[in-house]
Amino acid sequence: MLFGTPFPVESRNRHYGLAKNAPAMQVIPDGSGKLRMGTLIRLPDGAEVELCGEGFNDRTAKVHWAGATYYVFLDDLQSTSGSLAACG
């Protein structure tokens, strides 16, 4: 479970849509495999993201979108149908 949030990481529904132009912080692995924060961007309204891990606090989640991984606010996620395999 994502820090007591209603979005379990192992849930069947791993797809979520963004209801608005949502802020997202890119997550980039460094040479040693540790994650570092990348660029702060806005993902487009209606973008479908895949839940793939816990966020950096209880208000965020790690998602995969367009070949990259980001932290987004849980409040910006809206449930959609379907599921995919976990992302890195």
Image: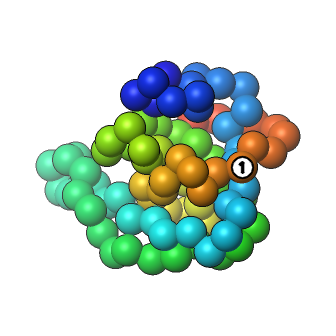
To which residue does mark 1 refer?
78
* Residue 74 vertical position relative to residue 43 in the rendered view, above or below: above
Q: Quadrant of the C terminus?
A: top left
Residue at the image point whose x is 33% and y is 42% from the top: 57
Instruction: Residue 9: tell me if it is visible.
Output: no
Q: Residue at x 48, y 69 (%)?
A: 23
Within-10-Å neighbours for mark 1: few <14, some 14–19, many 20+? some
Q: Position of residue 55 (x, y in %)?
A: 39, 43
Q: Is residue 59 above or below residue 38?
A: above
Of helix, strand and loop, which one carries label 1?
Answer: strand
Q: Is residue 41 above or below residue 29?
A: below
* Residue drawn at point x = 71 percent, y = 63 percent: 19
* Quarter residue 59 falls in: top left
Relative to 75, 70 lies left or right: left
> What amino acid type should be assigned to the residue bearing mark 1?
Gln
Residue 81 in percent (x, y) is at: 84, 40
Q: Nearer the viewer, residue 83 or 45?
A: 45
Q: Nearer the viewer, residue 24 or 38?
A: 24
Q: Quadrant of residue 17?
A: bottom right
Total labels drawn: 1
Residue 33 vs 9, above or below: the answer is below
